[in-house]
Amino acid sequence: MLIVDDEEGVRELLCDALRIAGYSPLAAPNGRAALTLLREKSVALVIADINMPQMTGFEMLSKLRAQGNATPVLLLSARGERHDVTEGLRLGADDYVSKPFGLEEILLRVNAILRRTRPDGDNAAIVQTGPLTLNDDTLASSTAVVDTYISYLRRKLHRDNFEGLRTVRGVGYQLVTGE
């Protein structure tokens, strides 16, 4: 996963949230640096801001698609104009999120894009640790339901020195391996 944003705080926030969610994100401060990085490394998804100096997210996406690179792209923008959404999708973006955004929304959209673009038979959505198996494809999306079941799981699982579910404020929950 590659995060492309000229605002360091946004890059760090997204990278931290994605790390907590189990991904290993890379970061680039602008479109030019992102294209250079994408020539050297393959990533599952690019999350890119539209408004960047040197090369906009639109220009980066256009060049990426012109090179025949079909890596999924999620665009971010502080501008909520309908023209930006249509332009981004016309250029080949897979999704679009307006700033300010919620981290939960970003993570759900990332998971949805990866689920759609993941090759058949890829079991990356299944995580197993200790006595717990999570399947991201069968995700419960209501936070009240999730909170209730997390409390049930904690009562049942937090025994025998296994403390595998950790609350991450503002993001959600983190599955901690028993290592």
Image (spheres, grey):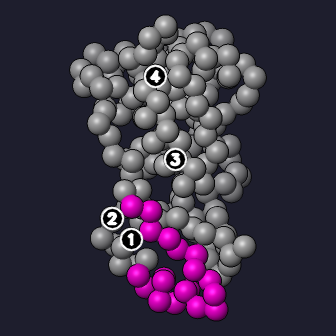
Res. 39 image quadrant: top right
Q: Which of marks 4 and 2 is in front?
A: 4
Q: Which of marks 1 and 4 is in front?
A: 4
Q: Which of marks 3 and 1 is in front?
A: 3
Measuring from the top left, give residue 129's x and y in whole percent. 67, 73
Q: Mark 2 points at which residue?
A: 142
Q: Mark 4 points at which residue?
A: 6
> Which residue extends farthest right?
40
Q: Is residue 54 visible?
A: yes
Q: Check disc 1: other Cα within 10 Å, few if <14, some if 14-19, many if 20+.
A: some
Residue 102: in magenta span: no
- Lower sequence index among marks 3 and 4: 4
> Please, what secondary structure does the residue beneath circle 3 have?
helix
Judge whether 33 appears above or below 5 on screen: above
Q: Do the residues labelled 1 and 2 touch (CB within 8 Å)?
A: yes
76 vs 19, left or right, is left
Q: In which quarter of the image is the C terminus?
A: bottom right
Judge whether 114 appears above or below 74 on screen: below
Marks 3 and 4, Cα distance to the nearest angstrom? 16 Å
